[in-house]
């Protein structure tokens, strides 16, 4: 027996049916476009910036810069107020601090020791010593202050801050500097400072240079002022010979024997140099293996 299958019926849509569907799509797109145009206006939303007008441009410029774009013909420009003069900086290197010198020391039993170790008081003292350059009332002072300290490690105290015999400053300046030193060292602790003995007496040599004049050059009487005033001061140097060791932390080697001379090099403490000349309080030295020479102030090499 053979199976009887129903006949297959194929329907082909006509052009009229397609036009109906495309018409619906077009209507939906048109409605969406109309909503997209009308909605921002009804909601008050701006999707793009509006074209600026001159008044808006000027108002915007004033808001951003705090000044009009340009001066109007009828509005004379107001000249800017002169700026305040920058405060003068304090003279550089006005206070020169030597290495610490230990005068004596005692052990825990109070017995004086013949040979004292080099106590590392610098780690807590040097920064405070440099601050003495700003001590009130000593702006015009110039000279040497021998500043002594008694260190008591058992009591963790710094005692008897006083001036030594080599001090050359006026007594009024000495009293002011001692007052500033006592104030700055009042709360300094000795904990962490390497030492071998219980107490020490030591001192520093502080040298205050005269302040610079209005032109920035040394005032008369300052070490090196005469050399700075004379262009040929370096040529007038007297010959000298010998060796010296830098005693400052950093000695500035200058092109001329003057405090405002150009800095040629910086030589660290402990460096051995050759002395070749002298001009006033300045010494000419050879400071490297190539034989380069320059001028240093006498106390920087212990002279």
Image (spheres, rainbow, N blue to C red):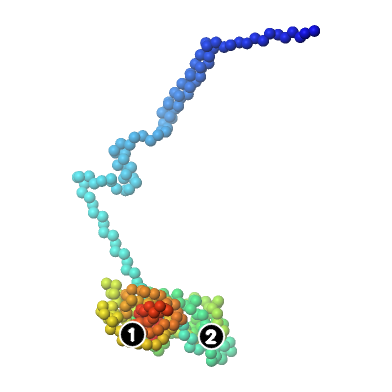
Residue denoted by label 2: 117
Badge 2 crowding class, 10 Å Cα cut-off, few under 14, some 14 to 19, many 20 or more, is some
Q: Position of residue 24 (x, y in %)?
A: 51, 17
Q: Position of residue 81 (x, y in %)?
A: 26, 57
The structure residue drawn at horizontal position 51% and vertical position 80%, both measured from the top left corner, is: 120
Q: Position of residue 85 (x, y in %)?
A: 29, 64
Q: Image height check: is 200 above or below 15?
A: below
Of all residues shown, which one is farthest toward the left? 74
Position of residue 65 in the picture relative to residue 163 (left or right):
left
Residue denoted by label 1: 278
Residue 171 visible in the current orientation: no
Residue 219 placement: quadrant: bottom left
The structure residue drawn at horizontal position 20% and vertical position 45%, both measured from the top left corner, is: 73
Residue 148 placement: quadrant: bottom left
Which of these two is toward me, 256 or 134? 256
Q: Position of residue 203 (x, y in %)?
A: 45, 84
Camera-nearest label, 2 or 1: 1
Of all residues shown, which one is farthest toward the right? 1
Position of residue 60 in the picture relative to residue 115 (left or right):
left
Q: Total number of numbered labels? A: 2
Position of residue 174 in the picture relative to residue 105 (left or right):
left
């Amino acid at each position: 027996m053979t199976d009887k299958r129903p006949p297959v019926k194929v329907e082909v849509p006509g052009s009229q049916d397609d036009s109906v569907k495309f018409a619906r799509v077009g209507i939906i797109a048109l409605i969406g476009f109309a909503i997209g145009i009308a909605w921002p206006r009804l909601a008050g939303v701006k999707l793009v910036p509006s074209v600026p007008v001159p008044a808006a441009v000027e108002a915007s410029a004033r808001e951003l810069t705090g000044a009009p774009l340009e001066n109007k013909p009828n509005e004379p420009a107001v000249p800017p107020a002169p700026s305040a003069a920058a405060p003068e900086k304090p003279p550089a290197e006005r206070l020169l601090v030597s290495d610490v010198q230990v005068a004596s020391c005692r052990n825990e039993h109070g017995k004086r020791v013949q040979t004292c170790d080099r106590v590392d008081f610098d780690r807590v003292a040097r920064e405070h010593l440099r601050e003495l350059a700003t001590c009130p009332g000593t702006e015009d002072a110039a000279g040497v202050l021998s500043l002594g300290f008694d260190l008591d490690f058992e009591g963790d105290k710094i005692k008897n801050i006083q001036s030594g015999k080599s001090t050359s400053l006026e007594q009024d300046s000495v009293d002011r500097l001692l007052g500033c030193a006592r104030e700055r060292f009042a709360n300094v602790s000795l904990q962490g400072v390497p030492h071998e003995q219980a107490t020490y007496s030591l001192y520093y040599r502080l040298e205050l240079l005269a302040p610079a004049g209005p032109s920035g050059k040394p005032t008369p009487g300052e070490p090196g002022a005469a050399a700075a005033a004379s262009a040929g001061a370096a040529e007038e140097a007297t010959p000298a010979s010998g060796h010296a060791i830098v005693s400052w932390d950093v000695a500035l080697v200058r092109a001329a024997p003057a405090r405002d001379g150009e800095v040629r090099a910086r030589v660290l403490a402990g460096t051995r140099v050759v002395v070749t000349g002298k001009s006033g309080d300045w010494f000419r030295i050879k400071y490297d293996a190539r034989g380069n020479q320059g001028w240093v102030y006498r106390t920087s090499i212990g002279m």
